[in-house]
Image (spheres, rainbow, N blue to C red):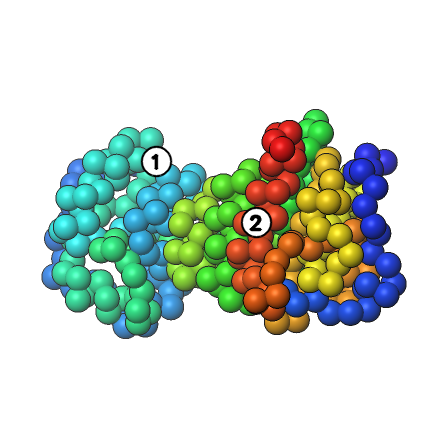
Amino acid sequence: MNRSRPPAAPRASDAQRSRPSAEGGRHNGPERRSQPRAGKGGGTGAGGGLWLWGAHPVLAALANPARKARRLILTAEALRTHGDTIQTIGRTARIPQPEVVDRADLDGLLPDGAVHQGIALAADPLPALDLLDLARAAEGRDTAVIVCLDQVTDPHNVGAVLRSAAAFGALGLVVPDRHAPDETGTLAKSASGALERLPLVRVTNLVRALDELKEKGFWIAGLAGDAPVTLAAAGLTGRIVLVLGSEGEGLRRLTREHCDYLVKLPQSDLVESLNVSNAAAVALYELVRREQGQP
C-alpha cells in the first residue's frame, strides 16, 4: 500500500539514528466470607490468572466481554459504593458472585502497598491480539495513531501511556514481548480501566512490526531528544505510529533507523528529559490538535 506522505519533515538521517535519545450472568447479592481463599502476595488469582484491583480497573474488567472474571471480592464499604454499578453490569454480563471480606483479608490477597479501594477481581489475562488487528482498525480512515514503546519496562509507565493513548483516541499500544512488563494488576491500576478498552499488542520483533505497519500505510515517527525538529513543526498528518523509548536509553539504534521521522518535544534546559508517560501524553495531544485543525 502506498503511504500518503505527511508534510515534509526532516527524515531520520544516519547521523541522527546513531545517537541514543534522552528519553452476563446476573448475581443475586453478595456472599459473605470470613476470609479469602488465597495466599498472601497477590501474584496470581484463581486458576492461575491475575488479580486486578481498584475501582476503575475492576469495573472496566467486569464490563469487558473479552475478560473472563473468576472472583469478585469487596469490602462492605466498597459494595455500598459500587453495588449499583456491579448490578447494572451483571444484567448483561456474566460476573462472579460478589464476596464481602474485611479490608485486612483483602490486603492479604494483594501485593504490599496495592491501593485497592476495597475491591479486587481475580481474572484471566486478556486474549492475545495481532498487530494486523490494529492495522485493520485503521482501514477507511484518513488519520490514525498507534503508539509503540521501545523497551519501556516500568508497568506504571506502560499503564499511564495506555491511559493517555485511550484518552486521545489512539488505536492501540504496541510493546515488545521482551523488555516490557507483563499484564499485571499494577499495570492495570496505572491504566485506570484503559487496559480493558484499548488493545495492547505484544510483538516478537518491534522493528519488524514497524515495517509491517509501514506496509499498511503508516508513517513512523520516533520521539528523540536530539531530533532536528519538534513534533509540532514537523506537521505530521495521516496514519502515524508514534514510537517512544525508555527514559534513560531512548530509542534503540535499530528502532531509530526504521523511523521515517525523528521528532522532539520543546522543553527547557531545566530538565534533561520528560517521563515517557508524560511525553506520550503531550505528543498525543499535539497529534490530535493538528488532526482537529486547532491552532
Q: Which label belongs to residue 182?
A: none
Q: Which residue is mark 1?
A: 93
Whether residue 282 sits left or right of residue 255 in the image: it is left
Quarter of image, res 186: bottom left
Residue at figure coordinates x 73%, y 35% from the top left: 238
Q: Disc 2 and disc 1: Cα gap in Å?
A: 36 Å
Q: Is residue 83 left or right of residue 177?
A: left
* Disc 1 secondary structure class: loop
Kindly state the secondary structure of the residue where label 2 is placed.
helix
Q: Position of residue 148 (x, y in %)?
A: 64, 53
Given the image, on which type of amino acid does mark 2 rest?
Val
Residue 131 relative to residue 198: left or right: right
Q: Earlier in the sequence, mark 2 or mark 1?
A: 1
Residue 154 percent across, percent down from the top left: 51, 66
Q: Residues within 10 Å of mark 2 (few under 14, many from 20)?
A: some
- For label 2, the residue is 282
